[in-house]
Amino acid sequence: MSGPRHADRPSHTEGSRLDPDSLEVAPGTLHETVEGWVPQLASEEELRMALEKAFDYRGDVTLRLKDDSKIEGYVFDRVVGNSLSNSFVRVMPRGASQKLKIPYAHIAALSFTGKDTAEGKSWEAWVRKYWERKASGEGVLSLEPEILE
């Protein structure tokens, strides 16, 4: 007993063209610019949405807690529960080595204060910059990391 052959697939028969663009099944990720954004956190849903964006953000955020303290740092993890009291974000505070776990229920305000370290650093931007440098006759080209403040 034998099954269908790979060569008998409709995309491989005579007269058909294999279009790679039509094979794409997963849309790309669109990174919106949120640097400098201070969302209004009027509802539970707005808080959850803002913290999801903070998790995806590639820079520091400033959290103002309900006790009026402020924490500036990088949101590197979050756990979303069924209520604000059992949902939390994990933050690496700027200039500190200890990581903090902050319940959503303790957050009064959020602002995207740090520089988005990946802004303008897509693969396409890198390739364009590389070819511009190569066309200008620049000598040895290498990858050097950007110095962060």
Image (tube, rainbow, N blue to C red):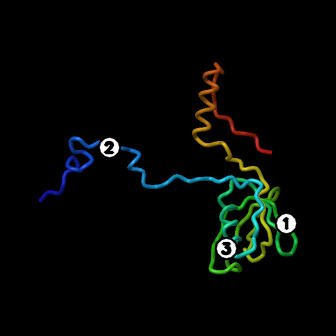
Quadrant in the rendering for residue 52? bottom right
Q: CA distance from mark 3 to mark 1?
A: 22 Å
User: Looking at the image, is 147 positioned above or below residue 102?
Assistant: above
Residue 129 lies left or right of residue 38; in this view the side is left
Q: CA distance from mark 2 to mark 1?
A: 55 Å
The location of residue 4, given as percent across then percent down, is 18, 55
| Mark identifier at residue 18 | 2
Q: Which residue is mark 1?
A: 70
Q: Which residue is mark 3?
A: 45
User: Looking at the image, is 63 positioned above or below residue 143?
Assistant: below
Question: Which quadrant: the C terminus?
Answer: top right
SS for dot 3: helix
Question: Which quadrant: the N terminus?
Answer: bottom left
Q: Are marks 2 and 1 in contact (CB under 8 Å)?
A: no
User: Counting residues from the N terminus, which is met first, the one under dot 2 or under dot 1?
Assistant: 2
In the displayed orientation, state which residue is furthest to the right.
68
The location of residue 68, given as percent across then percent down, is 88, 71
The location of residue 17, given as percent across then percent down, is 30, 42
**Callout 1, which amino acid?**
Lys
- Label 3 or label 1, whichever lies nearer to me, is 3
